[in-house]
Image: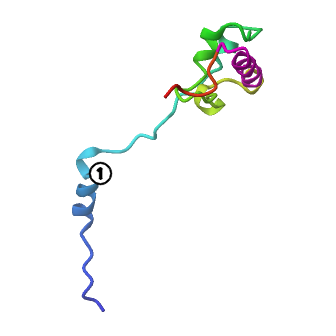
Amino acid sequence: MNDIRRPSSSSSSAQRGGGPSSGPKKPFLRRRKVCKFCVERIDKIDYKDYRLLQVFVADRGKIVPRRISGTCTQHQRRLTRAIKQARQIALLPFAAEI
């Protein structure tokens, strides 16, 4: 039962790239995304401004979620409503062109 060999700690850390020469690891700090509409003080999100709305629509035609775009909840709701209105009058596509 004691025949199981365990790799030594120096060889396993060298294989993973976290050897003694790499030094202490810094924690990865992600920069907090800020709402574009709050920063630029845009009060009204207009469905006719399709160039602004295109930034928040992915290549496949999906609306980009809050966690990716960084918009606040209030502006995300207004943005979603404006994108859907723009789709109805054919300013924005419903889906990607194939």
Using the image as rendered, state which of residue 37 and residue 17 is in the foreground: 37
Name the residue rendered at 64%, 31% in the picture. 65
Q: What residue is shown at x 59% (from left), y 16% (from top)?
A: 54
- Read off the residue under disc 1: 18
In the image, residue 82 lies in the stretch drawn in magenta:
yes
Which quarter of the image is occupied by the N terminus?
bottom left
* Residue 27 place in picture, x, y as percent: 45, 41
Residue 78: x and y in percent read 77, 20
Magenta span: 76-91
Looking at the image, which residue is at 24% across and 69% down? 8
Above or below, comparing residue 34 to residue 49 in the picture: below
- Residue 82 at what x, y percent from top left? 74, 17
| Residue 14 % position (x, y) | 23, 56
Q: Three-letter amino acid code at disc 1?
A: Gly
* Element carrying mark 1: loop
| Residue name at image x 46 percent, y 38 percent | 28
Residue 3 horizontal side relative to residue 89, left or right: left
Magenta segment, prevailing SS (helix, strand or loop): helix
Residue 7 position (above or below residue 27)? below
Asked whether residue 46 is drawn in magenta, I would say no
Q: Nearer the viewer, residue 6 or 84?
A: 84
Foreground of the two, 95 or 51: 95
Seen in the image, is 95 located left or right of residue 77? left
Residue 15, quarter of the rendered image: bottom left
Q: With 21 as the anchor, is 98 left or right in this view?
A: right
